[in-house]
Amino acid sequence: MLGVALYLVFFLIVVTIYAIVVMGLNLQWGFTGLFNAGVVAFYAIGAYGTAVLIGPARDRLIGGFEMPFLVGLAGGMALAALAGLIVALATLKLREEYLAIATFGIAITIQLVALNFEALTGGANGLIGLPRPMFDLFATPGGYNLFYLIFVLAVAVVIYAALERAVRSPWGRVLRAIREDVTAARSLGKNPTTTRLQAFVLGSAIMGLGGGLYVGFIGFVSPIDFLPILTFQIWAMLIVGGSGNNRGAVLGCLVVWGLWTASGYVISNAVPPGLQSQAGAVQAIIIGLVIVLTLLFRPRGLIGEEDVVSAHARDDEVTTPQEEIPAQQGQ
Amino acid sequence: MPRTNFTALAAMAALAAGGVSLPGGAARAQDQDCQHPIGAVLSLSGSMAAIGSAIGDAGELAVEHMNAAGGLLGCEADYRLRDDQGQPSVGVDAAQSLVEVEGAEILLGAIQSGVSMPILSSVTVPNEVTQISCCSSAPSFTELAREGGTDGYWFRTLPTVRPQGFVMADLANERGYERTAVIYVNSDYGLSLARAFEEGIEAQGGSVTDMVPYNQEQASYRAEVSQALRGDPDSLFLVAFPADGATAMREWISLGGPQNLLLSNALRAEEFVSAVGAQYLTDAVGIDNAQVEGPSVEAFNQSWEERYGEPPAGPGLHTMYDAAAVGLLAAQAAGEYDGTAIRDAVREITGPGGEVIHPGPEGFARAHEVLAEGGDISYVGATGPIVFDEFGDVTGPYLIWGVGEDGALTEVETWQVERVNELMAATGG
């Protein structure tokens, strides 16, 4: 049973890291309606940024600055934000589907840069031997994983709280106004371009943070960590969980990643020896089937978006902190 | 899937749907109520799916042979194969679950280096589990082992490309090439081979004029070829796969590049020769893994054919069988199912000295006897004799090939393992 508990800790670390990335996407798509099909690009920039900053120095590499992990994490986040800014400035005038294609192209480009810019990224071999923060302080890997889980959970809670606060603020209402009707928002004196830019950059920075946390946990980074399928997985998590709702985003991560991994466990135990090698296809079918069924029966996701727009519309609800209201009225 | 039949598929579907957990195989040599889980993480779907499932079968065959020979440490060895879908995050999760939940102390895999490496750094090394890969060829494992990052838990039965690069450098030197350009496929394989070659050339006091990577499946490699020609080379080392390699080679010849050619193992293909034209390749010389022959290889081929009804053709089958066999025999020799004990026993059951053990149930049964008597065994496997160096790497014999005027592939010479090791020692490889 201890083994199961240790595995669950490990599993939750990965889920929490993905949850952070999905919350970043939720800000972009769920609240602002920006179709970012290149999630993995910003995740990769954060991961490589962190890896280069914290990695050990090597002759062949430009990086290897051996900085403390938190500095690396902040650096990776800043780089992802910068990349988000550049991409946003170039593409945010595009309509949804065009933005999707542009960001998808950027994701492929980033992966190719990681593969080819050998002096910085280690090329196809990746960056090895990256330090795992405070690893030496723990006697067992299980103890360390528990520590890391608490760390990523704390980060996720801060991001969740900040995003919840932000999307319920006037700024958050502008996001949704832009998502629903750009012309109406503009006619009310809001500047859609600036607001979209802010949402895109902030979302990208959060994705980059997820990448940095992944690197700190795995201690290795290579281009095949950032295949386009990861973008699809992140999207599946958001859509299954409920786009436009941060709790849905987090739940979606748990469900989709749980399904993705548990199906492998079930199949390898259910299939008799002799057929193990053929079982891979069954797993893919089960994953696809469950996602399709979820969407058929709950098209808005497991927890859909709440129907309220303003905190004022739900004064009777205790979930809204009372002190928030005067603060908002003052604006 | 030529080995699958409908009954089996139907049975599998029924079991998967019911979520029934079966404790073991139908055909078993003896009834044992304890099991030692042998974990394997391979790409059964995703970009490596075409080869992954047969590799999984090879691992399973070794486990079956061990059970037929009397099991593992008085228990049954239970093969638990998981799919990494070609994705590191999925592979790491599968490995973690095999180690923590199912209690595997041996982990076989993965295929791609980019999956094996995160498993090694985040699962097997911290949890002190022995990891043996059939197929990951990246040199970064050697580098990590040299830094002490693997704690000795990493082994691979696939000869790395590093010695190949050194042998090619020796050939270039022997033939009097002084200015060699390198064009290589931009993958971990191509990069590793090109770098090893450069290192080998430098160790012999020569130099490489240019190292030019190319990305796969482009219509033209004129830019890469022009760049390689810029340093006025007298020869070319081309590390490529047949189709792209032919494109690059034709452009090299049409732009007036010298026909002193060194070719990598994947180019030993009729397809490449006919696409380029045999008349341009008569001075070319290439390298490949030599087909190891002998009773141990025969023993594997034969039992594969008996089990699956066709000869073992395809990459990774022989190396995967050996990966599993080495892990199982090491555990038996260690006397306990524990990752660290297995790690320490791996070199005791391989290498010269001790009674030679071949693949197959009879071989493993003999191993049980010898070990029970306190004797030493020396496993000579499906890939021939296996000697792990201090970083967990093995060296293989190599074949030097050329192209005849009629376009036939010819064998120039064979480098035995001893000669390769001598060269590596002499040049600091």
Image (cartoon, helix red, strand yellow):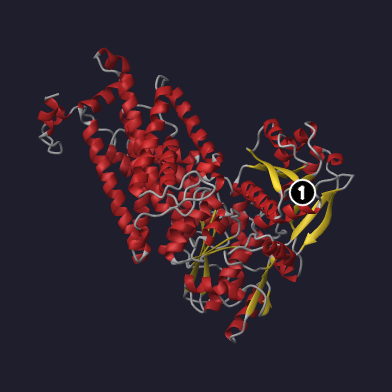
Q: Nearer the viewer, residue B208 or B57?
A: B208
Closer to the camera, B241 or A261?
B241
Q: Please identify the residue farthest to the bottom as the structure is shown.
A: B373
- Circle 1: residue type: Arg
Location of residue A272 in the rendering, given as x and y in whole percent from the top left corner: 53, 62
How far across and how far down the image is residue B253, in percent? Answer: 79, 35
Please provide percent x and percent y for residue B289: 72, 57
Above or below, A245 relative to B20: above
Residue A142 at x, y = what percent? 35, 62
- Identify the residue shown where x is 21% and y is 27%: A309
Q: Which residue is mark 1?
A: B268
**Quadrant of the frame with the N terminus of chain A:** bottom left
**Image point 25% across, 23% down: which residue?**
A174
Q: Viewed as shown, does residue A6 lie left or right of B407?
A: left
Residue B260 falls in which quadrant of the image?
A: top right
**Occupied quadrant, residue A248:** top left
Q: Nearer the viewer, residue B73 or A304?
A: B73
Can residue A299 be seen by looking at this rendering?
Answer: no
- Give me the residue at 87% from left, 40% from top: B279
In the rendered structure, the residue with mark 1 lies on which chain? B
